Image (tube, grey):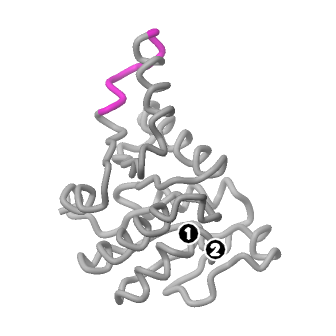
Amino acid sequence: MKISAVTVFCGSKPGNDTAYVNEAMELGIGLASKGISLVYGGGNKGIMGAVANATLDAGGKVIGIIPQLLLEWEAQHEGLTELIVTESMHSRKLLLYDKCDVAIILPGGMGTLDELFEMLTWNNLRIHNKKVFILNVNGYYNALIQLFDTMDQQGFMYDQWRERLIIFENVSAIMDALS
């Protein structure tokens, strides 16, 4: 399957480890170099802004999808290839899923986890069958991975979760998987 667009879910804050922003920028450059469009939440701050700016600076295409609520907070990125404004967070997530071939999860907070879990739930219910990649920068998601293993060991998973949620330790491994 040819990958033409990737949705990235990540924090609107940079986090405390500079590796988070650095890996986001490396991912943006990698996507642009392969002609893969970036689809993301449309923000201009934190890891979100870093991945978008790196993609744009490397000549890539970036589609931002932002709800009206955040537009009113002036949190949108002004220099994108395309900015789509939605009425709600829910309609935003639907578009973020619809417009991608693969989702990549970078470090982030509750919004990032909400998006990750909704996408995994939709996978589980066969609403879609898109791969989800986690970029586990400096072990950021180790505790979550351990929780998934516990859920599996305790009989709460319907299938092999590692077949749908693939863990990567660096951007170059993700770029290889996208090829």
Q: Which residues are magenta?
A: 154-162
Q: Position of residue 128 (x, y in %)?
A: 41, 44
Above or below residue 124? Residue 86 is below
What residue is at 46 percent from the left and 31 percent from the top? 125
Element type where label 1 sits in the image: helix
Residue 159: numbered disc: none
Res 74 → quadrant:
bottom right
The residue depicted at 70 percent of the width and 57 percent of the height is 89
Residue at (41, 22) in percent of width and height: 149
Which amino acid, mark 2?
Lys
Q: Identify the image quadrant of the C terminus.
A: bottom left
Q: Is residue 171 left or right of residue 109?
A: left
**Residue in the foreground of this view, choosing between 55 and 170:** 170
Q: Position of residue 146 (x, y in %)?
A: 45, 26
**CB under 8 Å between discs 1 and 2:** yes
x, y (%) of residue 84? Answer: 60, 76
The tag on residue 45 is 2
Q: Is residue 50 magenta?
A: no
Q: Nearer the viewer, residue 143 or 127?
A: 143
Q: Relative to 79, does residue 168 appear above or below in the rendering?
A: above
Q: Which residue is mark 1?
A: 48
Residue 157, magenta (yes or no): yes
Amino acid, disc 1: Met
